[in-house]
Each structure stands twice: as structure tokens, then as C-alpha cells.
Amino acid sequence: MGRVLTAWDEIPDLVITSSAARARATAEEVARAGSWKCPIVVDADLYGSGPGTVLGVAEKSATEEERIMLVGHEPTWSMLAEQITGGRVEMRTAGVAAIDLLADTWKGLVEARGWLRFVVNPRMFFGSEWDRESAGEEPDGA
């Protein structure tokens, strides 16, 4: 997913990940695969939390960043996308949802609204040019 997001010019300025080992590993691998130079912040509050807590973490962590990536867990991510956009979004393992917020700053994010630009997951790229395994390369999970 990191390579796909880089090709689409969707590189985050900041990655905030849950403290869970799998979430941290995913964040690090996606950033490596995409050759991102942005900081990766680990926040234990993202583990086992609800949408309000996730938005609070984003609000306190993001300062000047225009684009942040949050890495965490279901069912929180689907609930978060629905809270912000008003529509149901099914998040899959290693999936990415891009949401544009109707906000000028990260302050007051808990009440933020926005719209869904896209949702993608790695299975969409199996057998494509993005799939290293089908190209005879070692899969990297990103």
C-alpha cells in the first residue's frame, strides 16, 4: 500500500499508529515500501479506543501537518469513517480510507465532518504490477 499511495501522491506528513505490534509493524512497513520520510508516532491510546479517542489523538498529535495517516484497529476504523462521512465504510486488513475533512485546522477534530475520497485494500492489487509476489519478488506486506 505504501508504493501505491506514493504513486498516487498520497504520502502522509505524519503517521500515528497504535502501540499494538501488528499495527506498528504495518505502519513501518508501509512507510518503508513507500519510501516515506515522515515521522511515525506510536500512541497507546489508539489501541482499544473509539472514534472520539482516535480523533482526540489526531488533534493533539498533528500540528502543521496537512495529511496524517492513522493506523489502528477494527471496528473503530469503520465507525470512525462513518462518524465523519455519514456513510458506512468497511475497512479491511491493511486497507486505506482517504477522508477529506471540512476543517481548516486540527483543532476541534472530534466534531469534524468530511467526505470519503477513496477506500483501497491490498487485495485489489493482487496479480497487478503492484503485487511483488506475482512478479516473482518476495512479498513485503505493504
Image: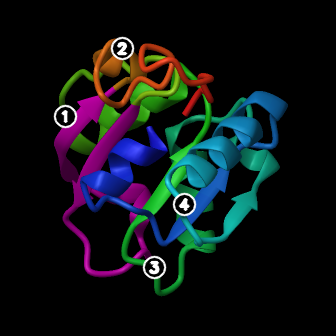
Helix, strand or loop at label 1? It is loop
Q: CA distance from mark 2 to mark 3?
A: 32 Å
Q: Nearer the viewer, residue 32 or 13?
A: 32
Q: CA distance from mark 2 to mark 1?
A: 30 Å
In the picture of the structure, the residue carrying the numbered disc 4 is: 35
Q: Type of residue at label 3?
A: Glu
In front: label 4 or label 3? 4
Q: CA distance from mark 4 to mark 3?
A: 18 Å
Q: Quadrant of residue 42?
A: bottom right
User: Considering only vertical position in the picture, is 9 above or below 84?
Assistant: below
Q: Earlier in the sequence, mark 4 or mark 1?
A: 4
Q: Quadrant of residue 25?
A: top right
Local crowd at mark 1 within 10 Å, few (<14), some, or many (≥20)? some
In front: label 3 or label 1? 3
Q: Is residue 89 left or right of residue 59?
A: left
Residue occupying the point 66% across, 36% down? 26
Residue occupying the point 33% across, 36% down? 81
Helix, strand or loop at label 2? It is loop
Q: Earlier in the sequence, mark 2 or mark 1?
A: 1
Local crowd at mark 2 within 10 Å, few (<14), some, or many (≥20)? few
Q: Type of residue at label 2?
A: Phe
In front: label 2 or label 1? 2
Q: Earlier in the sequence, mark 4 or mark 2?
A: 4
In the picture of the structure, the residue carrying the numbered disc 3 is: 65
Question: In the drawing, what numbered circle is on residue 86?
Answer: 1
Q: Type of residue at label 1?
A: Gly
Quarter placement of the C terminus: top right
User: Considering only vertical position in the picture, is 25 above or below 134?
Assistant: below
In the picture of the structure, the residue carrying the numbered disc 2 is: 126
The residues colored magenta run: 96-120
Q: Nearer the viewer, residue 41 or 51?
A: 41
